[in-house]
Image (cartoon, coloured by chain):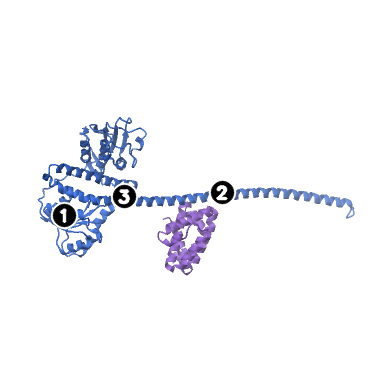
Chain colours: A purple, B blue
Amino acid sequence: MTKAKSELHHVIRSTVLRQQDLCADVTLQLWESLASQLVLIIGEAGFKSLFYRSVHVTAKQFSWLLTLGPSLPREAPFSNLAIRLNELDREEATEATIALLIVFIDILTMLIGDSLTTGIVRSAWGNNAFDLATTEFKK
Amino acid sequence: MVPVGSDDEKLISLTTKIQLLQCSNEDLLTQIAMLRKELLYKESHQTMMAQLREANQHLVIATVDAQGMQASAEADNKRQEEFLSMLAHELRNPLAPIALASELIGKIVFAHPDLAELQAIISRQINQMTRLIDDLLDASRLSNGKITLKRSIVCLMDVLQLALESSRHLFENRHQHLLVNNLRENPYIDADLVRLSQVFSNVLINAAKFTPEFGTITISVDSKDGFVVVVIQDDGIGIPHNIQPHIFQLFRQGFHSINRSQGGLGIGLSLARVIVEMHKGTIEVYSDGQGFGSKFTIKLPIATGSVAVVEKSSVPEIAVTSCQILLIEDNADTNFTLEKLLKQEGHRVTSRSNGSSGLFVAMQNNYDVIICDIGLPDMDGFEIVKKLRSETSLSIPVLIALSGYNQLGIQQKAKESGFDYFLVKPVNVAVLLDIISSITLYRK
């Protein structure tokens, strides 16, 4: 795994774990901001395709993810995901959120490379997410 | 002095104002032109951005679709491999008691004059069936790149000898002449003896199938530029030019063979190519076309450096003494025939048809050998052996696994569980009896 990819994984973990109690809301926010950045580059259909591929891959670990069918409009899967996360216990909701984001970011990295992916995630989630993850790591 | 507000003054002031206005008008026109240019640039930039976004979108969708298709193809391959493995297992299970029964009939051929010939037919067909099952598994391994080699330094003659042993009956059945030229060339090669003999056997079987009765098949050996060159030529039905480039593809057959009962699955030549290439060699086919025979040329690198060959040790004659054997096998026919065969060899045999009762008697009694099927209904062979090894206070007997599955993973698992030997169904009786005999030797 490259250094950049490992850093992105760390940022995902730290961002989700920091607000475990608000897992569903945080998830919704993270996905929406990622979508708003990525749609500019790969279009709505491109984002949707990438998202559902990630859902399909992660569903091997969390089978309930398959209920987020690809026929839904772009906003719907996020709110549906948030609803499903609210129904789960905190531990599983957190792990599923992290797993799905990591799979998504890994596929994106494979497509466009480390540098551009990091740039997009920074624009979407802000530098703060990276700074906090680094601080936590140092601690 | 001109008075303020005179007409001249007003005129001058107006002219100046007009000039200023003209200047700023020109500036404005220039600015408008520049803004128009910028706007055009911006518009074309935006159009380009939209086009790029669309292109990216297509690329992402195509890549994600390709990923999905790849994953689905891999899953299909896995399912196919599992199915073929299960199919082979299911076919081997009934074959095992037939083979054992054939062995038993072989011991009473004196009872009727036709019995010897009939038993030979059964035995040949069992071998043919076993070969087809092995081919099926090899096809699955081929498509998944799972063919492995166990290499050592071997001499070419040993390889050819082994290949001829498994194909000679075909030439005899079809009254074909087999000519072997220049066998003085006997170089050493770094090869997997069994796999490489399979290559020659497949080519020879192919030659036999596609050559009419009383035809001729010639094997010649030569060496050139560090390679040994084996040519197998026949005067059979030949191969049309348009088929020759595809002859080494999986499930591809040039013609239906003359004798459909020896039809095969179109796996042999494909397997041959892969094995030869794994040995860093080449295999080529040439035919002048339909009716002009075929010529297969196999080139293999000759082993370089000092060649250390493992000499075949002569096997000591072993006086067979009676062993106490426990047989755990759920297939009633295999259980019956194997028990009978072992008893005929003078061994004392206890048989059980399920795992738990097998384990129970194994824990209670001293046995020299336990022959145990892997796939039992209540407790599999791995578990029986693990429990036996960890819980018994008795001395551990020699443990022989029987299985219809012949995958490296299962063999490895059997070894890790504590089995000493792994035999694939239908059991090669001679090998099984050799193992049991060697135990009596060690016991001495």
Residue beneath disc 1: B339
Residue B279 sits in quarter: top left
* Disc 1 residue type (three-letter): Glu
Up-down relation of residue B70 to residue B306 (above or below): below
In the structure shown, which secondary structural element does the residue marked by tag 1 occupy? helix
First in residue order: circle 3 vs circle 1: 3
* Disc 3 residue type (three-letter): Leu
Answer whether labels 3 and 1 touch (C-beta < 8 Å).
no
Chain letter for mark 2, please: B
In the structure shown, which secondary structural element does the residue marked by tag 3 occupy? helix
Residue beneath disc 2: B51
In the structure shown, which secondary structural element does the residue marked by tag 2 occupy? helix
Chain letter for mark 1, please: B
The answer to whether residue B372 is left or right of residue B146 is left
Which percent across, then down, holds residue B150? 26, 47
Q: Nearer the viewer, residue B205 or B67?
A: B205
Residue beneath disc 3: B84
Name the mark nearer the viewer: 3 or 2.
Answer: 3
Which percent across, then down, holds residue A52? 47, 56
Chain letter for mark 3, please: B
Answer whether labels 2 and 1 touch (C-beta < 8 Å).
no
Up-down relation of residue B293 to residue A45 (above or below): above
